[in-house]
Amino acid sequence: MSRPVIVGVDGSPEAVAAAAWAAREAVLRRVSLRIVHADDPPGPATAWPDSFETRGRWAEDLLAEVAEAVRREHPALETEGRHRSGRPSEVLADEASEAGLLVLGSRGLGGVRGFLLGSVGMATISVTKCPVVLVRAPERPGAADGAVPAGPTRNVVVGVDLDRFSAPLLDFALTEAALRGDRVLVLYGWSMMPVVRDASALVAAERDMGPGIARRLTEALKPWRHRFPSTEVVEQSPVGGPARLLLHAADTADLVVVGRRVRTGSLGAHIGSVTHALIHHCPAPVAVIAHE
C-alpha cells in the first residue's frame, strides 16, 4: 500500500469528518494523506480577479487549517495540500488515479434518517476506479467522526452477489478488517418470486433453499479464508432485500463495503440500486468498490 489516501475538502462539517477519517485510514495503511480542494475557475462573463484571488486565499487557508488539525491528531503522518482549479468531480477523479483510496463527505437530510451525496460526489464515484469511502459528519456535537456504538465486536460489512461474485469487494473488505482487527460480516440477501411470498412459502423456501445457498456462500469464501487466516469471517444468507439487510448490519459496523459495476455506457451514474440506497441511508462510512 504505497499510494496515498486522498480526501476532498470544501469547508463543510462533512468534509472535516471525511478528513479525520481519511487521516486515521492513512495511519492504518502507513501511507501519506493528500488533502485536495478544487473549485471552478471563473468564466469569461464572471471573471472578477479580486473575487477569484479571495477564493484562492480562502482555499489555501482551508487546506492549512485541515492539515493542522490532522497533524495535531497524527503528528507523524505525512500530509500534503493541493488547491486545484477545475470542476471538482473531474479534479477529484484525476487525483484518484494516483490514490489507494478517495474519501468524500456525505451530509444529512435534516431529521430524516437519510443522507445526501451531492452531484460532485455522485459524478466522482461514477468515473473513479479506485475505492471511494463516503463519511458522514457526527450527529452530536463532539461525537467522533464515523463512530459506531460500543460493543463486543466491530464489523466490516460487505454485501455480495453469489450470481456475480466480486473478488475486489472481498479483497478490500478483508484487507480493511485485517488493518483494524475487525471481523468481516459477509451478507448475501435473497428472495423468492413475488407470487409465492406468503408466510408458508417463506418458511418452506428457507427450509428447502436456505442450506444450499449457505453452502454456496461458504464455498465461495474459501479462498479468502485461506488468504486471511487471522481474520474472522462470519457469513449470513438470510431471506431479504440486500439493501435492508446491509443497513441493519451497519449499526455495528466500522465500514460497509458495496460494489459498483464498471460500465461503458454514457448515460446515468452507473450506480446500482443497492449501492445507491447505502450511500444515501447508511449511518456508517460506506466504501464503494468499482468492479467488472
Image (cartoon, helix red, strand yellow):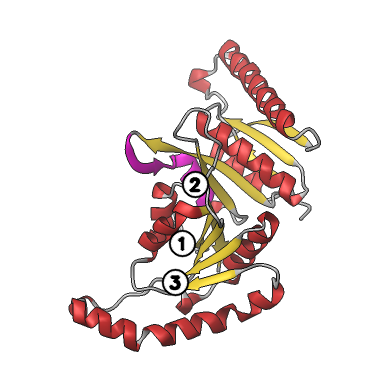
CB-based contact (under 8 Å), mark 2 and mark 3: no
Q: Position of residue 269 (x, y in %)?
A: 44, 53
Q: Is residue 206 above or below residue 18?
A: below
Q: Is residue 116 visible?
A: yes
Residue at x-position 51% and y-position 46%: 148
Mark earlier in primary sequence (2, 3): 2
Residue at x-position 65% and y-position 17%: 57
Q: Which of the 4 quarters of the picture holds residue 192? A: bottom left
Query: Which stretch is magenta?
Result: 111-126
Q: Is residue 57 left or right of residue 275?
A: right
As measured in the structure, the alpha-carbon distance from the residue carrying label 2 to the one carrying label 3 is 24 Å
As measured in the structure, the alpha-carbon distance from the residue carrying label 1 to the one carrying label 3 is 27 Å
As measured in the structure, the alpha-carbon distance from the residue carrying label 2 to the one carrying label 1 is 41 Å
Q: Position of residue 228 (x, y in %)?
A: 69, 71
Tag on residue 265? 1
Q: Nearer the viewer, residue 271 or 228?
A: 228
Q: Is residue 243 above or below residue 127?
A: below
Q: Quadrant of the C terminus?
A: bottom right
Amino acid type at mark 3:
Tyr
Asked which secondary structure carries label 1, the reply is loop
Q: Is residue 125 magenta?
A: yes
Asked which secondary structure carries label 3, the reply is loop
Q: Which residue is mark 3?
A: 188
Tag on residue 163? none
Q: Is residue 2 magenta?
A: no
